[in-house]
Image: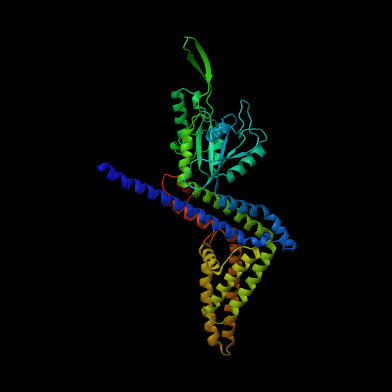
Amino acid sequence: MTHPQTSQPETASGHQKSSARNNQQESHLNRARASLRQALSWYSHLRSHRLTQPSNLELQAALKPELEVLTSTLNKLDQSVIRIAVFGLVSRGKSAVLNALLGQKILQTGPLNGVTQWPRSVRWTPNTSGKVQVELIDTPGLDEIEGQARGQMAQDVVRQADLILFVVAGDITRTEYQAFCELRQAQKPLILVFNKIDLYPDTDRQAIYQNLSQIAAGTRGHSQVKTIDVLLPDEIVMVAAEPAPLEVRVEWLDGKVTYEWETPLPQVDDLKQKMLDILNREGRSLLALNALLQAQDAEVAIAAKTIELRNTAAEDLIWQYTKYKALAVSLNPIAFLDLLGGFIADLALIRSLARLYGLPMTGYEAAKLLKTILFSSGGLLLGELGSSLVLGLGKSTAAIASGENPFNLSAYAGAAITQGGIAGYGAYSVGRAAQVYLERGCTWGQLGASTVIQEILNQVEPNTILYRLRQELGQLD
């Protein structure tokens, strides 16, 4: 009687946990969509056909690839498409693995190397609890000819992928390990698939699995290859995607004995279950995170290109505010008000630079950026502010006591000139530093890509793919 009573709370608790996880994933997806929509709205002026000035047309052309990335990434989020790409060297059975997952032979396989020449996408409809579509991407062998073209193609596929399957067919080679580590640099979740296990006796198979586990954990490496902690043993899955035919002895009723060849069924259930666990537990969060990382890269590139093309105008703008701030501070006879005027000038400079670059910047964000610049200057600008304050007090005292005393007037003028010079140098330094910070584009703010990425990573559970990515992205305390 006690067993049924205890099972009900456990079942309810599991259901509540699953529901909470689904709600969290949906929240991550919605936040990512909102972030990309905000970014596209900020940069909408760059897609306008009404921009006729040569400088604007040049900027529009330069930023077209990044804007297309933002648009396509948002479309991928809206359609909830999770892309799973398979990589490996030739003859490892990459296409066969995908065919086994699909349950039918859609992708071409064969005994010759290089059957797959270009990436090919196929929709997969597994039993996932989330409202997501899955796209499987088959790729050519990483060690085939036309290395440069293949390398660029692989980078493009990796950039779009939300999950990577890396297929090996035995003990990992030096070339495979190097390719494996290069894929890990993309900071995408990865499953190491040990295929063709039917070709090995059980003892050899287990030995190879142990070797793969040691390599994945970074405890064994090859010379001239950096070992890194990239996988746990449970992220290595053994499969036989296209088992070799077996000769079977058949006894007939009349006593006749014949031998026939039969092909065993694919052994991919463990891999399929691993993928389904990931998709159900954190698939939409992975999709959101990858989209935000792509958007972050695109927005940084937009800012960098814009700054490069608008560099001359920005230089003129910085010098203009440098002169304005120097005059405003030096001519103001009241201490503290001259410093306040200097702060206002710095804020106006930051916002003017942002407008020149077409980048988003509110007054609140400009104030935060100015604070960051001041405290990251190694105390240099803060020291200048202290000197300016002392000079301002001395200038105010000289102004009050001057009367018709030429000595006091000279003291006032000297203090004003010195203070103006310091203020001008500070304005120029702030302008230069602001250019560097503005290269981050609009990744800050409430819905900025960097902000939402941090939110997602702060909410991940241990023992998940996202938690591993959080470690790789350097987000752990």
Side (left or right) of 294 relative to 305:
left
Identify the residue shown where x is 35% and y is 48%. 12
Which residue is found at the position 73% from the left and 59% from the top? 57
Could you tell me if residue 394 is visible in this image?
yes
> Residue 100 placed where, x, y %?
53, 32
* Residue 435 placement: quadrant: bottom right
Residue 356 at x, y percent in the picture: 65, 65
Residue 336: where, in percent of width, then height?
51, 78
Residue at the outermost left position: 1
Q: Looking at the figure, which quarter contains the N terminus?
A: top left
In the image, residue 324 above or below residue 86:
below
For the rendered model, the colour scheme is rainbow
Image quadrant where residue 417 sits: bottom right
Q: In screen coordinates, is 95 left or right of 461?
A: right
From the viewer's side, name the closer residue of 196 and 213: 196
Q: Nearer the viewer, residue 96 or 297?
A: 96
